[in-house]
Image: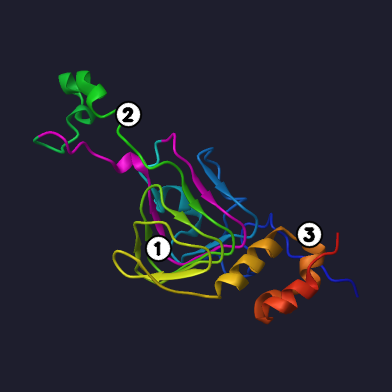
Amino acid sequence: MPLVPADPTVLHPMPGQPRVVLLKPLITSPLIEVGEFSYYDDPDDSTGFETRNVLYHYGPEKLVIGKFCALGEGVRFIMNGANHRMDGPSTFPFPIMGGSWADHFDLISGLPGRGDTVVGHDVWLGYRTLVMPGVRIGHGAVVASGSVVVDDVPDYGIVGGNPARLLRHRFSADDIARLLELAWWDWPLEHLTQHIPAVMSGSVADLEAAAPRT
């Protein structure tokens, strides 16, 4: 019997579990890009991800999430739109209140930002992780539950805490380089389907042996 890959276009991949949603077929905002099979898990409103979990997203900065990422319940991204001025006596955003105060909208436009927020491929963000603006989280990284990510996370790093600190790397530097070269997340789905055990529980050598031949 031929092996059949999972369908990346199904909104709810787990029958009877509406709390799990694939993000790519859900997202409508041009400011959010998500790769195939990245999912969000939330028993309350998983389909409200764009408004409940991506906050202050007025642009132009983007949120970019790679393929095969696992986002636990309550993961949130704070975007650059949350910035306030801090160079004057008050941080209050008077112009958004309307009236004649709106004449001073130039005082809150063009505030400095940190650029796009980027999550690599095969990243696991634990329960109630908070990701701050402009952070870049590397491929294969793991973020512990309840962490506040304020700085970049290296490939295959494990971070935790508030602010999140690097606890350790999942693999040696040499193995991380090999894993990045293999980039299993870019394998054709049919080939990946044949080698799920190697991807999930094999060694780096097993993954190399399973890689597509060009």
* Residue 24 in the image, given as x and y percentages of width and height: 60, 51
* Residue 85 in the image, given as x and y percentages of width and height: 21, 36
Q: Residues within 10 Å of mark 2 (few under 14, many from 20)?
A: few
**Residue identified by numbered label 1:** 74
Q: Residues within 10 Å of mark 3 (few under 14, many from 20)?
A: few
Seen from the viewer's position, the closer of residues 160 and 28 is: 160
Q: Is residue 109 left or right of residue 195?
A: left
**Which quadrant: the C terminus?**
bottom right
Q: Are marks 2 and 1 in contact (CB under 8 Å)?
A: no
**Residue identified by numbered label 2:** 110
Give the magenta range: 59-88
- The type of residue carrying mark 1 is Gly
- The type of residue carrying mark 2 is Gly
Q: CA distance from mark 3 to mark 2?
A: 42 Å
Residue lying at 82% horizontally and 67% vertically, measured from the top left: 4
**Residue identified by numbered label 3:** 188
Instruction: Examine the structure image and report whether residue 7 is included in the region drawn in magenta.
Output: no
Instruction: Examine the structure image and report whether residue 73 is included in the region drawn in magenta.
Output: yes
